Image (cartoon, rainbow, N blue to C red):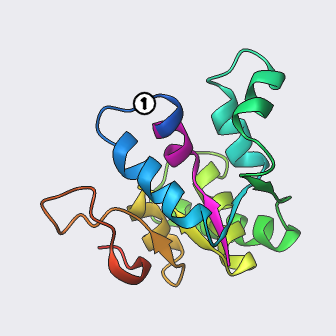
Amino acid sequence: MEILIDSNIILDVFTNDKVWFQWSSKTLSRYADDHILVINPIIYAEISVRFDSIEDLEDALPLEFFSRRQLPWEAAFLAGKCFLRYRKMGGKKRSPLPDFYIGAHAAVAQAALLTRDVSRYRTYFPKLRLICPDRAEKDIYALADGGACP
């Protein structure tokens, strides 16, 4: 099964985030053994801001570990529809947010999404399988069973 990896997870590892490094690195390792970890151009762009050159970024995202997929046209359409709903609900941004593209890509590809930003994905993609921290537990590093997130 493919798992789309949200940029926050990869950045947690690259930046050695004080709060999230442990959870993100353990979870990436856990799923890398028997799943295909995927990024798309939106995720790539979000991660790129931490690098001075494309060569450094390419070295940090080896193809042996992160498969790359283009954003499907169907996902772009779905992202636009989710953005329209966001605007109707009072959202102030004037163009679709990256999370809409990422969530739509996972939904259209029928892939799980590894993220720690749950609320927007739950609001706009309620059927999307999320792999995320279990916020109901005191231990923020506990993984929610079956990918269900609070």
Extreme-top residue of the structure:
52
Which residue is at the front of the view, 78 or 106? Answer: 106
Which residue is at the front of the view, 29 or 77? Answer: 29
Q: Is residue 102 magenta?
A: no
- Residue bearing the label numbered 1: 16
Q: In the picture, residue 149 is in which quadrant? A: bottom left
- Looking at the rendering, in which quadrant would you find the N terminus? bottom right
Which residue is at the front of the view, 106 or 27? Answer: 27
Q: In the picture, residue 112 is in which quadrant? A: bottom right
Residue 127: image location, x then y, percent: 52, 85
**What's the magenta region?**
1-12
Q: Residue at x 61, y 23 (%)?
A: 50
Extreme-left residue of the structure:
138
Residue 84: image location, x then y, percent: 62, 65
Helix, strand, or loop for circle 1? loop
Residue 63: image location, x then y, percent: 81, 48
